[in-house]
Image (tube, rainbow, N blue to C red):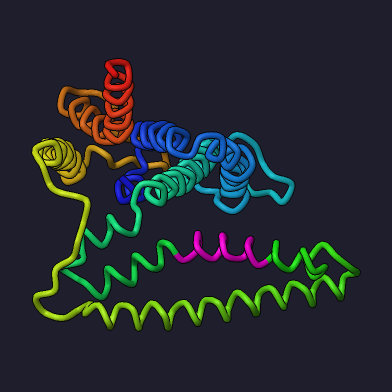
Amino acid sequence: MIGFSMFFMHPICLAVSLVCAFSYSVYLNGKKAVRMGLIFMLPMLLFTALLNPLFNHHGMTILAYLPNGNPLTLESILYGIAAAVMLVTVISWFSCFNAVMTSDKFVYLFGRLIPALSLILAMALRLVPRFRAQIKVISNAQKCIGRDVSNGNLLRKAKHGIRILSILVTWALENAIETADSMKSRGYGLPGRTAFSIFRFDRRDGWAMVYILSCASIVIAGAVLGVYQFRYFPAISGQWSGFGVTMVFCAYFALSVFPILVNLKEDFTWKRIESNI
């Protein structure tokens, strides 16, 4: 979905992907996703949508003329809105990926195929959350002895901030050495080494893979046939109707909404099990 959202600029695809991505992000992250949408994504969407017509003056439908004499066209406005929606949608999908794809899942999927790269990516995924949690611990410890960034004048605050950053870097280096020694002692990367995992591929995963591959195949076939091609310049043109076009867009919607349906089904099953206890 991240890849499709980046390359398909058709308005229907953008609208479907944006609604599904933001809904799934709200489901996973709750109020945090709503707050990020209102504080960060909505201003970014408006800024990107307004910025494009100021520099892009292509298009046949002239609405007005700017003070510098350049035309303001309908096509440039619509393209700016589409680009802004695409950017916000991709960020929303990445937030969902960050919430769902934990490091242990990543290692389970790619640990045997690419053990070194999977380990690096798994450590990179958990790097920012671990640093964020550790810097809170360090800041609270320093605050107890009066060395927090909120204490003193500007120079003292900067000095305290540098001290906290130095402690964090020292902790990170020591943690990296300990992790390397631990992995070496456990034989990571040696041939024949097995790894414990709580995940297993069962029948539900098989049906889910069939569903995803089926929808993705229809979406890719539609992209090859040019269904998702949409021109903004010099005039608006694209495919909107037809049986084949409708089927392709329905497959795109089915693929986009699938994560939400899976989680809602799990919630329903869990509540039913709780009610039977």
Find residue 235 and report its image quarter: top left
Left or right position of 85 against 107: right
Q: Quadrant of the C terminus?
A: top left
Q: Nearer the viewer, residue 257 or 111?
A: 111
Furthest residue in direction top, as rendered = 275
Q: Tell me what residue is drawn at x 35 percent, y 54 percent.
A: 102
Q: Position of residue 149 (x, y in %)?
A: 78, 66
Q: Is residue 268 magenta?
A: no
- The part of the chain drawn in magenta is 127-138
Q: Position of residue 66 (x, y in %)?
A: 69, 44
Q: Nearer the viewer, residue 45 or 274?
A: 274
Looking at the image, residue 136 lies above or below residue 100? below
Secondary structure mostly seen in the magenta stretch? helix
Looking at the image, residue 168 lies above or below residue 218? below
Q: Position of residue 83 (x, y in %)?
A: 47, 46
Looking at the image, residue 117 lies above or below residue 102? below
Q: Tell me what residue is drawn at x 28 percent, y 59 percent.
A: 106
Q: Nearer the viewer, residue 96 or 225?
A: 96
Residue 53 can be seen, yes or no: no
Q: Tell me what residue is drawn at x 25 percent, y 34 percent.
A: 252
Q: Tell me what residue is drawn at x 57 percent, y 81 percent.
A: 170
Find residue 204 and report its image quarter: top left
Left or right position of 157 against 109: right
